[in-house]
């Protein structure tokens, strides 16, 4: 480290200490004489003391200079020689005066090996090389410390590198310690900066420093003055050509006889390319860091994607596996292992036919050759589980062929269809039973139709005779009967007619549950037109209105049965109506999603108590007497059977004296056709 001002003061006291002591003794002697003899008799003694003080100081100063001069100048010559040949070893005679020199060497952290102490002291061998540090560094350190005492009278300062610094290719200079103006500058520095020495001497170094670095440069130069040096100062400057440059600056303070810094010695190095390279390196490093982070992110995503796909493959709800060109298993997923109960090492590398039952294995070679030829396969087969059980499987696969047409491997997916086959077998069995039941039902329905026809014909024939002869009796013999007899005959006629109506309704009811016509698209507008015409007499008699909320849509069903259903509901709405202006409205619920359509028939009639909303659809369930309202009570039961025959449903919403609204849910369009039963072919 450089010598501090305090250290220089200590050196000064050491060098001048004897002279000061001698001078102080003379001053003390003079003062004593003055006190004893008084003035002017003590004056000669005082003058002599002052003269002796000056002589002692001068003698001590000359002695110190002479004591330091020889070793210092010799060291300077050796260092100059070392600059020409950095690897050259040199020998210095060890003398006490070189103590500070050796301390300077310690500051440079140079290791030396002195011989064992002897009297007189032995020599000290040093080897300095350019690979370790330059002679310039050494001379700078020596100049800062030990060489101060070698100043000759009249010299302002000493720089041992004076002889060579400004003639080499190094960029070195001297700056004033207060203004930092140039004093000297090497040719290399002048060429680098673009200014001549004359121009530089008119400039301060801070003038060429970048504004952003100005304060830092000023503070570092000031610190070099107080500390003795500043190293590794990187600054941005501008040359005479206006080009921005970056320099690395090393500064060392030089001291005068008054122990103050006389000037600064500066060594600069062009580090523009280095800074640019470092900046480019930092930029590339940041870019690489970002790219690396992106790659890490991508790698994480790839790992997650890999895990997802691995999970999708290993735990798929289907069995995946691959065969090589010899039909051996290359790979399979965990689902296959779980389904069959095998370990992975029990199937990988094994022939595929090991999974087949014994009776199928002989067929595999031919099937596999056909698979290789066609490149795809879709079959149903059977596999043997680890437990020995056999399961049905559906297998679909493709081949992967190389550029030379050689089979590389296969991609195959398999599904356990044992449960499906079991269900299919059960379904076929149930279908067979259902078909048999339907045939039996058809036969019974046919018998019922024949029976109903016979019964209705046979029952109605006596009733017709009874009604006819009762009419004859009243017409021809009515005057011979008393009032009671005539009333009895009328009862007989009414009962016969009711019996005929009941038989007719029973026949209608028996046929209502069977759709006699074909299902087709039914236009409700046309159906309503026919109903209004058929019920025209009742509508006129009641003074009623039958209206529709247009437009009525189309639906899917038996046109005649749907017309019969709506006619029954409309006639009931008119018949069970005591309003002065009866009306019936037919419409559909708007914007109803799905394949079903809801039709409503609303009236302003007498209404129905909610407790009877279900009972009214039962056969012959009447809520009123025959005297109040005629009818058999079979109309709504017939309507309910028609709706159920269409797969729909019917219900009512009503309150007494609030009218009634009947809702019928029927299909808009034909249902989706059932999938036909497919023939299952088992293959290897």
Image: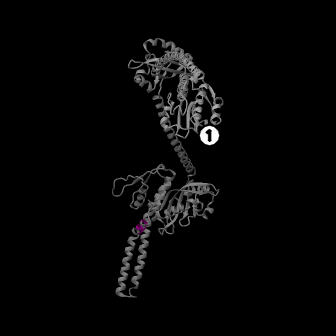
Pointer 1 local density, CA inside 10 Å: few below 14, some 14–19, many at least 20? few
**In the visual, does 423 lie left or right of 646?**
left
Q: Is residue 10 one of those drawn in magenta?
A: yes
Q: At which x and y percent is residue 342?
A: 40, 22
Image location of residue 416, percent across then percent down: 46, 22
Q: Nearer the viewer, residue 117 or 647?
A: 647
**675 and 418: which one is in front?**
675
Q: Find out whether residue 315 is within the magenta segment.
A: no
Q: Nearer the viewer, residue 575 or 467?
A: 467
The residue to which callout 1 is attached is 581
Task: Please indicate whether residue 62 sits to the left or right of residue 513 in the image.
Answer: left
| Residue 552 showing in the rendered view | no
Q: Is residue 29 above or below residue 661?
A: below
SS state under label 1: loop
Residue range in magenta is: 7-12
Q: Classify residue 547 by image quadrant.
A: top right
């Amino acid at each position: 480290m450089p010598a501090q001002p305090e250290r220089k003061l200590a050196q000064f006291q050491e060098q001048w200490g004897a002279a000061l002591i001698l001078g102080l003794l003379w001053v003390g002697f003079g003062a004593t004489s003055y006190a004893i003899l008084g003035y002017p008799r003590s004056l000669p003694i005082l003058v002599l003391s002052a003269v002796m003080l000056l002589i002692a100081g001068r003698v001590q100063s000359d002695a110190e200079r002479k004591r330091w001069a020889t070793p210092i100048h010799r060291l300077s010559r050796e260092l100059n020689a070392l600059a020409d040949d950095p690897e050259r070893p040199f020998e210095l005679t060890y003398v006490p005066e070189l103590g500070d020199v050796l301390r300077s060497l310690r500051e440079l952290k140079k290791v030396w090996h002195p011989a064992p102490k002897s009297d007189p002291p032995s020599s000290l061998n040093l080897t300095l090389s350019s690979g370790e540090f330059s002679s310039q560094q050494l001379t700078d350190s020596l100049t800062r410390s030990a060489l101060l005492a070698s100043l000759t009278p009249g010299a302002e300062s000493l720089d041992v590198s004076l002889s060579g610094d400004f003639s080499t290719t190094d960029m070195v200079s001297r700056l004033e310690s207060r203004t930092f103006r140039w004093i000297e500058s090497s040719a290399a520095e002048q060429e680098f900066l673009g200014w001549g020495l004359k121009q530089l001497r008119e400039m301060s170094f801070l003038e060429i420093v970048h504004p952003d670095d100005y304060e830092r440069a000023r503070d570092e130069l000031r610190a070099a003055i107080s500390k003795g040096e500043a190293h590794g100062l990187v600054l941005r400057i501008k040359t005479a050509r206006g080009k921005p440059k970056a320099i690395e600056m090393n500064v060392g303070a030089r001291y005068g006889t008054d122990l103050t810094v006389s000037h600064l010695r500066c060594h600069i190095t062009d580090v523009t390319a280095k800074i640019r390279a470092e900046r480019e390196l930092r930029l590339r490093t940041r870019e690489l860091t970002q790219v690396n982070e992106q790659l890490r992110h991508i790698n994480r995503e790839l790992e997650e994607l890999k895990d997802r796909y691995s999970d999708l493959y290993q735990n798929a709800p289907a069995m995946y596996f691959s065969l090589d060109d010899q039909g051996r298993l290359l790979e399979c997923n965990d689902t296959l292992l779980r389904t069959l109960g095998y370990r992975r090492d029990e199937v990988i590398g094994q022939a595929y036919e090991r999974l087949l039952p014994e009776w199928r294995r002989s067929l595999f070679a031919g099937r596999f050759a056909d698979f290789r030829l066609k490149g795809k396969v879709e079959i149903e087969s059977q596999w043997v589980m680890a437990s020995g059980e056999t399961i049905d499987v559906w297998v679909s696969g493709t081949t992967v062929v190389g550029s030379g047409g050689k089979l590389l491997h296969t991609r195959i997916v398999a599904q356990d269809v044992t449960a499906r086959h079991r269900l299919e077998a059960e379904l076929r069995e149930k279908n067979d039973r259902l078909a048999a039941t339907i045939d039996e039902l058809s036969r019974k329905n046919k018998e019922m139709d024949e029976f109903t026809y016979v019964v209705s014909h046979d029952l109605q024939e006596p009733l017709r005779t009874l009604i006819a002869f009762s009419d004859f009796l009243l017409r021809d013999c009515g005057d011979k009967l008393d009032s009671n007899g005539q009333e009895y005959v009328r009862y007989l006629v009414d009962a016969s007619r009711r019996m005929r109506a009941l038989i007719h309704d029973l026949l209608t009811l028996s046929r209502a549950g069977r759709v006699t016509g074909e299902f087709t698209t039914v236009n409700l507008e046309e159906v309503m037109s026919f109903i209004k015409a058929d019920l025209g007499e009742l509508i006129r008699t009641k003074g009623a209105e039958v209206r529709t909320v247009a437009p009525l849509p189309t639906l899917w069903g038996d046109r005649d049965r749907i017309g019969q259903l709506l006619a029954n509901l409309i006639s009931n709405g008119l018949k069970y109506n005591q309003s002065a202006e009866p009306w019936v409205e037919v419409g559909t619920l708007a914007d109803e999603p799905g394949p079903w359509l809801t039709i409503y028939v609303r009236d302003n009639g007498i209404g129905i108590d909610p407790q009877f909303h279900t009972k009214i659809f039962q056969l012959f369930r009447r809520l009123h007497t025959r005297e109040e309202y005629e009818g058999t009570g079979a109309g709504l039961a017939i309507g309910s059977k028609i709706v159920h025959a269409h797969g729909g449903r019917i219900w009512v919403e009503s309150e007494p004296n609030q009218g009634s609204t009947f809702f019928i849910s029927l299909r808009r369009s034909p249902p989706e056709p059932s999938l036909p039963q497919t023939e299952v072919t088992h293959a290897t």
